Image (cartoon, rainbow, N blue to C red):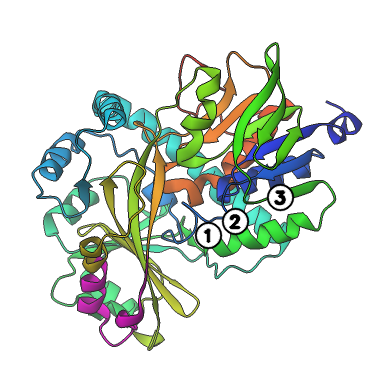
Amino acid sequence: MHEQHKNSQRVVVVGAGVVGVATAYHLAQRGYQVVVLDQADAPAAICSYANAGIIAVGHAASWAGPEAPRQMVRAMLGKELSVKISRFMDPDLWRWGLSFLCNCNVAAHRKHSNAMAMLSRHGRDALRKMEAEVGLSFDQAHDGVYYLYTSQAKFAARMQGNIGPETGFTPHDASTLMTMDPALQAFHGKLQGGLISDVDSKGDCQSFTAKLVDWLTERSNVTFHFSTKVTGYVTKGARVRAVLTDTGHFACDHVVIAAGTETPKLTASFGVKPMIYPIKGYSATYQILDATRIPNRPFIDETSLLAVTQLGDRLRVTAIAEFAGHDRTVTADRVAYLDTYVDQHFSGAVDVAQAEHWAGLRPTTPSGRPYLGRLRKTSNVWLNAGHGQLGWTMAAGAGEVMAAMISGAPNTAPQVSETARWLITP
């Protein structure tokens, strides 16, 4: 496609979370005229707002694995602190859950995890490139992440996996870790060992997205419309000619739906219902009072299944996967779990009493792989949705893949998408 032709092409991106805005950036870089629509009143207001802040390449593995069914049974019995099921009678949950169970075998887990790892690595590399090109500051750092184990059995099992400097994961015993980073003394007597990953990064996702919106707004080929709800489409044959909203209509040559958990609603009129379930996660953000007691790197507590990240003068802690439909209520007992953990390990180092609590919905597919492709029965409607807990990790790479697909350029990350009969993937 010639550059002059591309400059006349109009793309409407539905969704101004980190995935949608990253997609807009890569489309703009290819010369497209881009309009971004979002029903929220600001960018990164839903799933991207207060997430873990970790670009977690090292955590890019499918949740659907041989151990997952046992974990789900424990969750149903109320014995799994990190997983909660609040809406047993949700038909979408049962539909999603059956597909999830079908992906819990060893072969499927390996296939999906490899695809997720590929897109995650691509995402981190693309983010570093964007960071250099745009010059944004978002409390980022690229010196890796700790993976900590307070269970000897879990640490021993992880040591049987793929580790070593060539993989980006270097194992250390507890004593070495606490010597390297004295703040890890908070786990003295409990820590059994851990890994340092040099393939992971950190950064404030909401800050990045909002600043990228400002940067793009200054360019002539990107416009943003917030507080704008999509109500339908004007179609002609197999093409969408315009996107209808409650504030007007937007003519287009292509539509990219990057709306997270809202995506199935936005594709319903095309007879398509992507299998994306909203899994609620909780976070708490604390003002740091004594930075010397905060670890030098973000860490993932692999036993308690919490992520802890320093973002400037704040500490962000995230945990829990709750199946509660589209309910975004911040439940007191859930966030108390976060506050208790922080109080046990960092009492006096942060202001627990003034914590800011939040709950967001992770748009999750049964396999963990996002939908990246074009609807089969249309010629210009594309999906970039379903990244689950790895939206911040995959966003920049998925946006680049999406822009390449629309422009007809070679795909730099093949076979990373979830597959479906109604979707054409690269």
State yes or no: residue 282 in magenta: no
Which residue appears at 18% of the width and 77% of the height?
188
> Which residue lies under the disc numbered 3?
224
Label 2 and label 3: CA atoms lie apart by 11 Å
**Looking at this view, is 223 or 131 the one in front?**
223
Asked where in the image residue 306 lies, by quadrant, the reply is bottom left
Which residue appears at 74% of the width and 29% of the height?
407
Q: Position of residue 203 (x, y in %)?
A: 52, 64
User: Please, which residue is most extreme toward the right here?
Assistant: 4
Label 1 and label 3: CA atoms lie apart by 18 Å
Quarter placement of the C terminus: top right
**Looking at this view, is 130 or 241 the one in front?**
241
Disc 1 is placed on an element classified as helix
> Which residue lies under the disc numbered 2?
41
Label 1 and label 2: CA atoms lie apart by 17 Å
Q: From the viewer's perspective, is residue 295 above or below residue 409?
A: below
Name the side, left or right, on which 248 lies relative to 105.
right
Q: Nearer the viewer, mark 2 or mark 3?
A: 2
Q: Position of residue 259 (x, y in %)?
A: 54, 40
Mark 2 belongs to which amino acid? Asp
Q: Earlier in the sequence, mark 1 or mark 3?
A: 1
Other residues around mark 2 within 10 Å, as few (<14) / some (14–19) / many (≥20): few
Q: Earlier in the sequence, mark 2 or mark 3?
A: 2
Disc 3 is placed on an element classified as strand
Q: Nearer the viewer, mark 1 or mark 3?
A: 3
Mark 3 belongs to which amino acid? Phe
Q: Which residues are magenta?
A: 338-357
Mark 1 belongs to which amino acid? Cys
> Which residue lies under the disc numbered 1?
205
State yes or no: residue 339 in magenta: yes
